[in-house]
Image: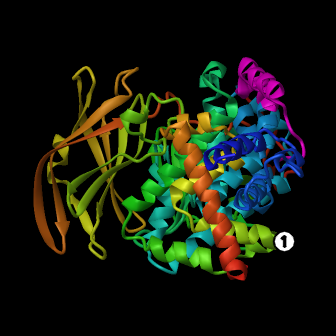
């Protein structure tokens, strides 16, 4: 057989290999024409490649399987309620997830921090952001959320701990834990309030802020990322157990912004970050977006491409920013929130709510004013960044709607309430 | 390739069941069957492309989450499920590398060299010396060759399916695969113990 024929024979054998043909059928023991030794050696390499299975390396197979099942089940509300009500008070399952997630995150952060501080920002960019109306955008990588709300009774009044979040420290901001309580604040005796942690530490309340008619926010120091359980202690001996999960596990609404050119492909990867070059040394990226009835929220980040150079937003001209959809409708900016996450320079812009069905929009900036090396500089535009927004969300529900009883001491009779 | 093979007809049946019943409802069990079957292959695909096992874990998770989310968009008439799934995987790792290139303040080259030359705890589970040599040899190939080898041997895709995913011609795919295997053969025979 000619060399060309043998090459064709080899290609056929490769195809048969991937359809699970027997090895003995691929390399003939006896043949009228013996294949060249090189081809036989190549085929043996191919057999090794076909047998290569590295799945045993992964420590995440079981955890991911559980998480996928949880993702699927949590989409059906009555299933969610049933599952949560059946969940025991404390399960090692959550501890394993929190522990493994924490270990992977800690390993990644420590491993990369050897080289550069901005690697922390890199980890966040890979893992993405979540959004809560009271908090804004926050990194998923190091954040804990209250796993489910808790309702308790004080002085014949029902009080609901509706939501909680703990944010880890950054180079510019200390970590913090917030708990939102709904109920008549006049009946809440918060004079002696603290969080008991499983490691024996206590976090005293740092501030109590009224954030609505019957809503207050308690602030504490941040919880360690491996926290799964804590107890909120109130005056009168009231002890309310709280469960925490990593934000990545909470089934938050997606916030990934994609490039519109990838939006209609069957295998669209929604984690592509749209960016544009403002200058050769400066890049603007849309890290995350969230759309609800309150508006279209966009997390923007400025990044200098020059090593060691930092850049900051100067927000003078930001109020002229706007979104434009494919029908040329304009959504003006209504608010902005400066932010600073782990050394990167971020800014959240809020526009009016984009109409339903208009996921492709263009962010339009007439220019960008920045501060760099102590100098203020205006970079004239216009700058247009095409975005594919995530789906609109009507309700933010990062934690499931399960109510559990609270323990009250010294009163021995627990109060159990449930919601339909 | 795997100890519990699923035939093509069985795979079609499982996928159809997952889509019809809805992966977010009664079809979740069917989807998990697919997950169990493809996990190792997807993970191994990423190990061809990426030396860091933790990143491979993240990319594997991302791939299956995307597949779960978009399962109702899968169309059997356009190709087999494996090709669709590995298309998602390929997108995931390509986007990962594109993102890493954008953030140039991160000394990624140092990180890559560090992770590929120093022994990692995970390498202890690789008991087979031949396997270690093979992985090390693969890591020295250009990314395109690693991608095609991974799609072929981990993904189990034929040349036509690989061509459809990569935009190359079938003939080009066959030539690149053969050349890559030749290079691996030469590296393994010439370098020998260097890769242990």
Give the position of the C terminus of chain A as an image quadrant: top right
Q: Mark 1: few, some, or many residues within 10 Å (few <14, many ≥20)? A: few
**Is residue B96 magenta-colored?**
no
Instruction: Choose between A107 and B63: the one closer to the eye.
Output: B63
Query: B98 and A312: which one is in front?
Result: B98
Apparent side of residue A218 relative to residue B23 in the rendered image (left or right) = left
The span shown in magenta is: B1-30
Q: Chain of mark 1?
A: B
Q: Nearer the viewer, residue B179 or B3?
A: B179
Q: Is residue A202 visible?
A: no
List x then y, in percent, for residue A307: 30, 74
Image quadrant assignment for residue A301: bottom left
> Looking at the picture, how far across and down is residue A308, in whole percent?
30, 76
Q: Magenta segment: does it hold B10? A: yes
* Residue A359 versus residue B157 in the image, above or below: above
Query: Residue A319, relative to residue A90: is it above or below?
Result: above
The residue tagged 1 is B127
Which residue is drawn at the image coordinates 78% and 21% (left, top)?
B17
């Amino acid at each position: 057989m000619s060399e060309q024929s043998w090459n064709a024979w080899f290609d056929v054998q490769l195809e048969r290999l991937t359809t699970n043909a027997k090895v003995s059928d691929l390399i003939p023991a006896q043949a009228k024409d013996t294949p060249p030794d090189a081809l036989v050696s190549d085929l043996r390499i191919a057999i090794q490649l076909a047998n290569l299975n590295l799945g045993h390396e992964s420590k995440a197979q079981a955890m991911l399987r559980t998480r996928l099942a949880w993702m699927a089940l949590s989409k059906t509300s009555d299933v969610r309620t049933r599952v949560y009500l059946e969940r025991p008070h404390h399960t090692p399952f959550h501890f394993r997830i929190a522990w493994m997630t924490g270990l992977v995150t800690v390993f990644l952060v420590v491993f990369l921090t050897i080289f550069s501080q901005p690697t922390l920002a890199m980890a966040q960019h890979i893992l993405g952001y979540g959004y809560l109306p009271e908090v804004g955008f926050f990194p998923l990588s190091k954040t804990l959320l209250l796993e489910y709300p808790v309702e308790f009774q004080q002085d014949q009044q029902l009080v609901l701990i509706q939501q909680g979040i703990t944010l880890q420290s950054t180079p510019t901001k200390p970590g913090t834990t917030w708990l939102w309580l709904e109920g008549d604040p006049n009946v809440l005796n918060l004079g002696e309030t603290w969080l008991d942690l499983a490691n024996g530490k206590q976090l005293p309340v740092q501030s109590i802020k009224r954030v609505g008619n019957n809503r207050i926010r308690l602030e504490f120091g941040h919880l360690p990322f491996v926290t799964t359980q804590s107890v909120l202690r109130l005056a009168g001996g009231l002890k309310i157990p709280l469960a925490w999960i990593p934000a990545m596990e909470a089934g938050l609404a997606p916030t990934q912004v994609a490039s519109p050119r990838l939006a209609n492909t069957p295998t669209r990867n929604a984690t592509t970050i749209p960016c544009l070059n403002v200058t050769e040394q400066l890049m603007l990226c849309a890290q995350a977006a969230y759309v609800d009835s309150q508006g279209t929220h966009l997390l923007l980040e400025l990044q200098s491409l020059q090593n060691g150079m930092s850049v900051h937003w100067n927000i003078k001209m930001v109020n002229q920013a706007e979104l434009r959809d494919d029908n040329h409708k304009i959504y003006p900016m209504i608010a902005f929130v400066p932010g600073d996450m782990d050394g990167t320079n971020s800014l959240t812009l809020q526009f009016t709510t984009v109409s339903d069905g208009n996921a492709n929009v263009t962010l339009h900036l007439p220019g960008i004013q920045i501060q760099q090396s102590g100098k203020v500089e205006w970079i004239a535009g216009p700058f247009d960044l095409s975005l594919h927004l995530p789906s609109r969300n009507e309700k933010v529900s990062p934690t499931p709607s399960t109510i559990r009883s609270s323990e009250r001491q010294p009163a021995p009779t627990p109060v159990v309430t449930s919601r339909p | 390739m795997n100890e519990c093979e699923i035939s093509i007809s069985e795979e079609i049946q499982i996928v159809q069941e997952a889509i019809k019943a809805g992966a977010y409802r009664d079809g979740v069990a069917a989807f998990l069957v697919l997950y169990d079957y493809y996990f190792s292959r997807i993970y191994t695909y990423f190990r061809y492309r990426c030396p860091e096992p933790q990143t491979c874990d993240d990319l594997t998770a991302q791939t299956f989450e995307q597949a779960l989310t978009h399962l109702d968009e899968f169309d059997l008439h356009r190709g087999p499920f494996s090709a669709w799934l590995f298309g998602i995987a390929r997108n995931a790792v390509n986007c990962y590398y594109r993102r890493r290139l954008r953030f140039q303040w991160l000394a990624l080259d140092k990180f890559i060299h560090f992770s590929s030359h120093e022994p990692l705890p995970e390498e202890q589970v690789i008991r087979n010396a031949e396997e270690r040599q093979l992985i090390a040899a693969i890591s020295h190939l250009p990314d395109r060759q690693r991608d095609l080898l991974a799609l072929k041997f981990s993904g189990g895709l034929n040349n036509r399916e690989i061509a459809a995913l990569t935009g190359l011609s079938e003939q080009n795919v066959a030539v690149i695969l053969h050349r890559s295997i030749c290079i691996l053969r030469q590296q393994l025979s010439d370098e020998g113990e260097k890769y242990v």
